[in-house]
Image (cartoon, rainbow, N blue to C red):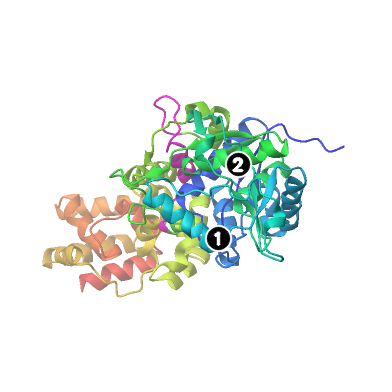
Amino acid sequence: MEIKPKVVTRFAPSPTGFLHIGGARTALFNWLYARHHGGVMRLRIEDTDRARSTTDAIDAILNGLSWLGVPGDDEIVYQSARADRHREVAEQLLTDGKAYRCYATPEELDDMRERARAEGRPPRYDGRWRDRDPGDAPAGAPFAVRLKAPTEGETVIDDAVQGRVTFANKDLDDLIILRSDRSPTYMLAVVVDDHDMGVTQIIRGDDHLTNAARQSMIFDALGWDVPGMAHIPLIHGPDGAKLSKRHGALGVDAYRDMGYLPSALRNYLVRLGWSHGDDEFFTTDEMVELFSLEAVGKSPSRFDFQKLENMNGHYIRGEAPDALMTAMEAIAPSEPDGEAAVAALSGPMRANVAALMPAMAERAKTVRELIDAARFLWAARPLSLDDKAAKLIDEDAKAHLKGVGEALAAVDDWSIEPVEAAVREYTKSAGAKLGKVAQPLRAALTGRTTSPPIFDVIAGLPKEEALGRIADQAA
């Protein structure tokens, strides 16, 4: 006998585009709630809009969830494959007198809307076929199937985030559940799928709150238990306006490509609307242990790239070098020097990059910044110096480069301590301050005035490469 989990959540995206950041947070909240209660999160692809649903979008959603670390449990449900089941339920509602055939023509419906607008009323269906004999319709006339919704009283949603929300039934008309072409509507399909998937808790954006009332009516008409509801506020931009692409309403894949770690993005997203005191950083296990819908706020959250970058920097500093290398390899192909970067990260230079990782991670806020910090390792000679670095290479600097190059050539053990000792000994013998030697040296070896610590840089390059770059600028 199959043992059903006590708690089942679901994430149900429409595959008409990428997995946007708001959807990613919704998936995370569903995943955390399910894990907290020892349940499962099921994934449903709501692909009934066949004209706009694409395989690429489905792949992007699945890949985004996998990368973020919140994949669905069990087999994926594709809503379009369940149309026969949806129609079966609509027919049952007809048989039970809970729904009826509506023969209103498109022209009649347009007229209803126009009169409602003229009278300052919300446009609603007027129920003209609700109690009318279907025999009054012309033979063979097309019809839609409408739910016979209650017309008096209230529909109440006891929402775990929004609290008790009431809707006057007189303001909710008889919604269509089956179109005239016999295709099921979104409202019906969602209810049937949630019931058949055993969903016990719905967690979604508060833009679905009105849908909750209509869907509750369908649940009630079918005699099915209504799942728990939790409608979370949407994410806004830093200026308080609706989140747009200029704010960061991008796909999860874009955040990966920009160099954010999934652990950091999970942590940032969970703090957009949920809190646990003043704590900012949570491991995934801590999120699972602490997450509750009661701690989700009612006000919209504001997306802040600077906070995300700072959080990502925190996670980079705590991440294992191998994991950072893997993250660098994943996005290196999209770099301007992608071919050289990939060759370096997967070839003999990999060990040099790994050795520099602790020093690079101290300053980096994104994986792309790690790649940028390591770029000097695979840069080709003669090295191109930026303007600030080029200004450092004056005649005094060239003399120091020649001298320190000779000192480094005598080093047998090419590691940080011996190369540091050689540079400091040369500096002392030349009667110069370390900066007067280290800055031109940094410029010659990296082409920049900023880099990881200079002794890490020297030891990070193969000896012959380092000496060659020094000689290039000393000439």
Type of amino acid at the residue the image marks with label 1: Ala
Q: Where is residue 361 shown, x and y percent of the image? A: 39, 48
Q: Where is residue 267 shown, x and y percent of the image? A: 46, 39
Which of the two marks, 2 or 1, is nearer to us in this view? Answer: 2
Quarter containing the N terminus? top right
* Lateral position of residue 24 relative to residue 33, left or right: left
| Magenta-span inclusion, residue 309 | no
Q: Which residue is mark 1?
A: 60
Instruction: Relative to 391, say whether 46 is above or below.
Output: above
Residue interval drawn in magenta:
258-281
Q: Where is residue 106 shown, x and y percent of the image? A: 54, 62
Q: Which residue occupies the foreground of this view, 162 or 103?
A: 103
Confirm whether residue 15 shows in the render: yes
Type of amino acid at the residue the image marks with label 2: Gln
Instruction: Relative to 465, say whether 238 is above or below.
Output: above
| Magenta-span inclusion, residue 261 | yes
Nearest to N terminus: mark 2 or mark 1? 1
SS class of the residue under badge 2?
Answer: helix
Residue at x 35%, y 48% (from the top left corner): 242
* Lateral position of residue 278 relative to residue 172, left or right: left
How dense is the environment of label 1, judged by Cα within 10 Å: few (below 14), some, or many (20 and up)?
Answer: some
Q: Which residue occupies the foreground of this view, 297 or 185?
A: 185
Which circle marks residue 215 in the picture? 2
| Residue occupying the far left of the picture | 395
Residue at x 38%, y 64% (from the top left corner): 377
Q: Which residue occupies the foreground of this view, 178 or 465?
A: 178
Disc 2 and disc 1 in contact, CB within 8 angstroms: no
Confirm whether residue 351 shows in the render: no
Q: Where is residue 185 shown, x and y percent of the image? A: 62, 54
SS class of the residue under badge 1?
Answer: helix
